[in-house]
Image (tube, rainbow, N blue to C red):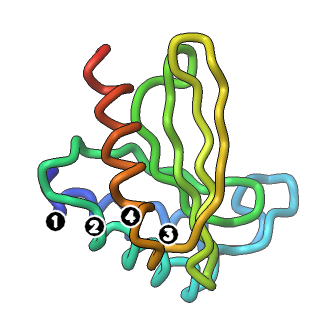
């Protein structure tokens, strides 16, 4: 993954979602602490990992995802307090979990799940 490219995409996503009502349904703006948490998450991901896609969920948390929304998918969202939610589907099985960014097993779990999803593309 080219972290500079992803960092630019992350900033562009922050900028697009930094105003109130960014979704035309009354959404609150994404906060700077949420942006900083997303940067922290991005910097913790191994460079050999495939480049994620980025979006903002309905809780104004940044999400990184791999795969496609209509097939196998793995997604990570992060709160400003560095709490992580993971959700995905692989081979018809849905899974979810949560952790904190500093949990030692977290990055290995992400690496394994991203490999499972992206090796099928």
Which mark is first along the chain, 3 or 2?
2
Q: Which mark is residue 7?
A: 2
Q: In this view, does 23 lie to the left or right of 85?
A: right
Give me the C-alpha separation between circle 3 and circle 1.
Answer: 15 Å
Indicate the secondary structure of the residue bearing disc 2. helix
- In depth, the one of 95 and 47 nearer the eye is 95
- In depth, the one of 20 and 120 nearer the eye is 120
Q: In which quarter of the image is residue 115?
A: top left
Residue furthest to the right: 26
- Is there CB contact under 8 Å for labels 4 and 2? yes
> For the residues carrying marks 3 and 1, which lies nearer the camera in this image?
1
Position of residue 107 relative to residue 119, above or below, is below
> For the residues carrying marks 2 and 3, which lies nearer the camera in this image?
2
Which mark is first along the chain, 1 or 3?
1
The residue beneath circle 4 is 10
Q: Residue 4 carries which label?
A: 1
Indicate the secondary structure of the residue bearing disc 4. helix
Give neighbour class at mark 2: few <14, some 14-19, many 20+ (Cα, 10 Å).
some
Spot occupied by residue 58 in the image (x, y as percentages of width and height): 76, 55
Position of residue 83 relative to residue 80, above or below, is above
Indicate the secondary structure of the residue bearing disc 1. helix
Give me the C-alpha separation between circle 1 and circle 4.
Answer: 10 Å
The residue beneath circle 3 is 14
Residue at screen point 47% across, 61% down:
13
Give me the C-alpha separation between circle 4 and circle 2.
Answer: 5 Å
Spot occupied by residue 100 in the image (x, y as percentages of width and height): 56, 73
In this figure, what is the number of numbered marks?
4
- Is there CB contact under 8 Å for labels 4 and 3? yes
Residue at screen point 28% across, 62% down:
45
Residue at screen point 14% across, 57% down:
47
Q: Quadrant of residue 118?
A: top left
């Amino acid at each position: 993954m080219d972290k500079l490219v992803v960092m630019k995409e992350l900033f562009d996503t922050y900028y697009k979602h930094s105003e109130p009502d960014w979704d035309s349904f009354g959404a609150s703006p994404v906060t700077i602490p949420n942006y900083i948490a997303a940067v922290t998450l991005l910097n913790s991901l191994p460079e050999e990992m495939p480049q994620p896609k980025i979006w903002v969920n309905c809780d104004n948390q940044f999400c990184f995802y791999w795969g496609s929304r209509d097939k196998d998918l793995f997604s990570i969202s992060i709160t400003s307090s560095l709490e992580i939610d993971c959700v995905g589907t692989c081979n018809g099985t849905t899974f979810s979990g949560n952790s904190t960014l500093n949990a030692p097993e977290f990055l290995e779990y992400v690496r394994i799940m991203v490999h499972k999803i992206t090796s099928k593309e």
